[in-house]
Image: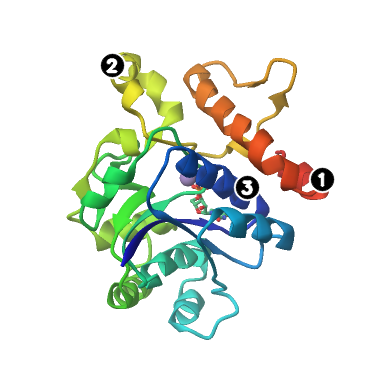
Amino acid sequence: MSEAYVTLATNDGYAVGALVLGHSLRSNHTTKDLCILITPGVSPSIVSMLESVFDKVVNVDVLDSGDSAHLSLLKRPELGVTLTKLHCWTLADYSKCVFLDADMLCVQNPDDLFSHPELSAVCDIGWPDCFNSGMFVFVPSLDTYGRLLQHSETSGSFDGGDQGLLNTFFPNWNRLSFVFNMVASATYTYLPAYKQYGGSVKLVHFLGAMKPWQYSYDTSSSSVHVSSGYELLAPYLNSWWAIYLSLVKPGVPEMVAQQLAG
Ligand code: UDP
Ligand code: MN
């Protein structure tokens, strides 16, 4: 059985993020499959682009399905995107997977992630006893999926999202290096560590309200304008935009591209 990176997009913004992420994994010569879960919120033209980059595009519509996830959603309506994300455990054609948020960028090959067990992840910088659920190693299993849905109904999520839910379900998670889920906006808080280890970063995570596709790009200087304090983020945002402009934007209909900018 093969192994795959899995991401998720419920709208065109995150789908464009997923396209850049997919290209960045390919250009770093991953040997793993690329799989994406999408909902009907993604435009058909973007879906065709996803089909050319990802090996597998899986339609998930929790709202419209009559399955157990839909029943869980009726009990916990606040968990919409979260219950969609949990669908990654149903990908039983794969023996092992790595979930990646669509707002991530690969800068070096991270395939050695697959040598780690479920559930492996990186500390959350806000509360390091918890893992950040933007990247995690997992083993697809319908049994685990069922137990996760059960857990969502009985315990809910302490933060209203997947991170709270997954942290209470996997309290004995295995801690991986920060280079597999580097939160770029946080690096400047420990600049000497960034200078020491930054060269080993494999996956950057643009966590927070402002996503790469929402920045304005200055074509004359070929760079993104970042506010002061966020300078370390700039090279990664510029790499994201270089991939977006060369490999993604040419295929995005103008109307969709305009709606992405924040
Ligand atoms: N996501 C999505 N649509 C949404 C919100 C989130 O598809 O409206 C997916 C997407 O893969 C995203 C992930 O869920 O990367 C987690 O959300 P986000 O990255 O915005 O959270 P953060 O990392 O900023 O906490
Ligand atoms: Mn994220």
Residue 203 lies in quadrant: top left
Q: Position of residue 121 (x, y in %)?
A: 28, 47
Q: In this picture, is 202 found above or below 40?
A: above
Q: Position of residue 225 (x, y in %)?
A: 64, 21
On the picture, is 73 further left or further right than 157? right
Which residue corresponds to mark 1?
Answer: 254
Identify the amino acid type marked 2: Gln
Q: Quadrant of the N terminus?
A: bottom left
**Colour convention of the picture:** rainbow
Q: Quadrant of the C terminus?
A: top right
> How many residues crowd mark 3 within 10 Å: few (<14), some (14–19), many (20+)?
many
Which label's residue is closer to the chain start, 3 or 2? Answer: 3
Which residue corresponds to mark 3?
Answer: 16
Question: As rendered, which of 214 and 3 lies closer to the eye?
Answer: 3
Give the residue at x 28% y 72%: 144
Which residue corresponds to mark 2?
Answer: 196
Give the residue at x 29% y 75%: 147
Question: As rendered, which of 1 and 198 lies closer to the eye?
Answer: 1
How many marks can you see?
Answer: 3
Q: Which mark is residue 203?
A: none
Identify the amino acid type marked 3: Val
Which label's residue is closer to the chain start, 1 or 3? Answer: 3
The answer to whether residue 158 shows anywhere in this view is no
Alpha carbon separation for disc pair 1 and 3: 13 Å
Q: In this picture, is 181 found above or below 86?
A: above
